Amino acid sequence: MATTTLKVNGETRSVDVEPRTLLVELLREHLRLTGTHVGCDTSQCGACTVWVDGKSVKSCAMLALEADGREVTTIEGMATNGSLHPMQAAFHECHGLQCGFCTPGMVMIASELVRRNPEPTESEVRHWLEGNYCRCTGYHNIVKAVLTAAETIRSQGGA
């Protein structure tokens, strides 16, 4: 066993894990943050996307020990003071989900896009989402949600 200490959603956590433990396992099984989903175990679907030091990472492809000393944000860390993040709200308002399984990963990757590019085009949104699969919606409402959130964030002066 090894100890890893990381900041998860603003809270410093120390966890004893086996060296082969994946970050997604640490989040779900040790910290009980089950919003991060395991879809494929091969980093193909994006359901496990979280931010590590502000950048999107597929947590099923990263060892928990690699996150030692780093800051991890999960879907649970997106809301502030009981209010949904604008991206979360837009997914709800624009019906950007059906079964919801891919939604946490989609919200995480889309939020990073809008943080990097506050005025993405539809084409840029579609390109950015290529590594995250949705088997239900056909992406139209997901793209609409991302563009709606980007507009909301811009009108609020950034988020």
Image (cartoon, grey):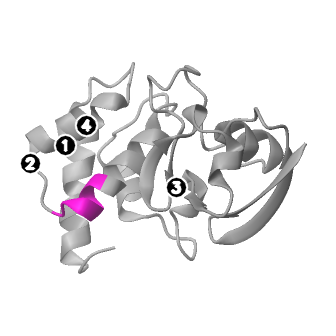
Tag 1 and tag 2, C-beta contact below 8 Å? yes
Which quarter of the figure has residue 88?
Answer: bottom left
How far apart are the alpha carbons under marks 3 and 2?
Answer: 25 Å
Residue 121's label in the rendered image is: 2
Q: Mark 3 or mark 1, which is nearer to you?
A: 3
Q: Is residue 4 left or right of residue 103?
A: right
Which quarter of the figure has residue 76?
Answer: bottom right
Q: Is residue 137 visible?
A: yes
How far apart are the alpha carbons under marks 2 and 4?
Answer: 15 Å
Q: What stretch of residues is rendered in magenta?
A: 113-118
Question: Could you say whether the residue bearing mark 1 is in a helix, strand or loop?
Answer: helix
Give the residue pinned by disc 3: 52
Residue 125's label in the rendered image is: 1
Q: Is residue 158 left or right of residue 99?
A: left
Return the disc, 3 or 2, that comes first in the chain's sequence.
3
Tag 1 and tag 4, C-beta contact below 8 Å? no
The type of residue carrying mark 4 is: Asn
Question: Could you say whether the residue bearing mark 4 is in a helix, strand or loop?
Answer: helix
Q: Is residue 149 visible?
A: no
Q: Which residue lies at the image location 38% right of the left edge and 21% below the top edge? A: 136
Q: Mark 4 or mark 3, which is nearer to you?
A: 3
